[in-house]
Amino acid sequence: MLDTPIVHFDNVVKRFGSFTAVEKADFQIARGEFLAIMGSSGCGKTTTLRMLAGLEDPTEGSILLDGEQINGKPTWERDTPMVWQSLALFPFLTVQENVEFSLKMRKVPKAERRERARKWLDRLDILEFADRNISQLSGGQRQRVALARSLVTEPKILLLDEPLSALDAHLKVRMQSVLSSLQKDLGITFVYVTHSMSEAFSMADRVVIMSRGKIEQIGTPEEIYREPHNRFVADFLGSSNVFSGRLASDGSSVWTVKAEHAAFTVKAPAELQRAPGANVAFAVSSENMSLAPAGASCTGNCVEAVVVGGEFAGASATVFLETDQGQELKVQKGHDELKSVDIRAGQKLLVHWLPEHCHVLPGE
């Protein structure tokens, strides 16, 4: 439980007819936190955000904002502005008028509206475009206008629904830096929905991973990356190889896990106990795996696999392989580390790793 939560989802369920979009969401968001909610399309992340914004009402459970239940409370009374994926800027208004709009709706005097709007335009480095039409701006400039329009009311919390999805890769990285710095400077709580791991992990203090309406794991980016809770999280992140089998040892901290065609030695936390014969799944990060010529001697765990392809980017490369049993593996290494092996497609190699690099998936 968090010390100073600004938001509490208390066993929230959202159904659309017979379809359950969000199932028993129970989590808190700390004041001043940057929380990212991520998952594939249809996982319930946007529905969760829309319930917080007041655009959808929970079917069951409660949503509390600053300790007050806001179920059924109109959007305009919540002070939870949203930056939309489409940005939803008014094309018939200038940049200045777009930013002033929410203040105008609150009947803020004209002179004050102008002063506050220009302050935020200046803060986001777009004051020089104040009198331009929206159609005259680049994608990044429009993004900043949408942020200024949401922040001009100085809310306690800002909701962002995949706001960078329409930007090109270079501009997306720049805007990630802008958003992260802005959130830290302002101390405003950000709730950010995305399907992009790079966006969520580069900006957020904590990440919520959802699948089919359920929360699969909540934690810091490092916790989730290093210690995925279950097979879904490990597969979704795409950075690990997952193996499964049955526990053959007595369940001490060093386990022997027997798969169909191999046995693996796994170092598991002492507090994680399983009975012999129990099903066990563990993940090994692609960066903790190594490659050697087929038939080479091996310490630790090893399997033979055939190279099916490679992806070369910057200082590292990812090699994709497949075992005789059809399991797909990926190994990520620096180019220097790959010089000693032949990574042409069709080449058989030995994939090996240490027992301490196995992370037992507790949720399996």
Image: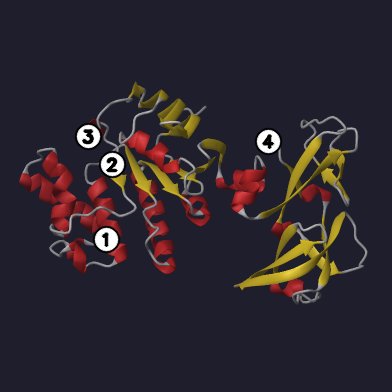
SS under mark 4: loop
Task: Identify residue type, mark 2.
Answer: Pro
Residue 154: give x, y in percent of width and height. Answer: 25, 41
Kindly indicate the quadrant of the structure image that contains residue 16: top left
Q: Separation of disc 4 and disc 2 at Cα?
A: 36 Å
SS under mark 3: helix
Identify the residue under disc 1.
142
Residues 45 and 256: in front is: 45
Q: Which mark is residue 81?
A: 2
Identify the residue under disc 4.
363
How many residues crowd mark 4 within 10 Å: few (<14), some (14–19), many (20+)?
some
* Image quarter (top left, top right, bottom left or bottom right) of the C terminus: top right
Residue 140: give x, y in percent of width and height. Answer: 32, 63
User: Does residue 195 appear in this view?
Assistant: yes
Residue 71: give x, y in percent of width and height. Answer: 33, 25
CB under 8 Å between callouts 4 and 3?
no
Looking at marks 1 and 2 on the same chain, the residue that comes earlier in the sequence is marked by: 2
Q: Residue furthest left?
A: 110
Residues 80 and 22: in front is: 22
Q: Which mark is residue 76?
A: 3
Q: Separation of disc 1 and disc 2 at Cα?
A: 17 Å
Looking at marks 4 and 1 on the same chain, the residue that comes earlier in the sequence is marked by: 1
Q: Is residue 170 left or right of residue 251?
A: left
SS under mark 1: helix
- Point 69% across, 71% down: residue: 309
Residue 90: give x, y in percent of width and height. Answer: 18, 55
Task: Identify residue type, mark 4.
Answer: Gly
- Point 82% across, 53% down: residue: 354
Looking at marks 4 and 3 on the same chain, the residue that comes earlier in the sequence is marked by: 3
Task: Identify residue type, mark 3.
Answer: Trp
Which label sits in the foreground, 4 or 2? 4
Task: Identify residue type, mark 1.
Answer: Arg
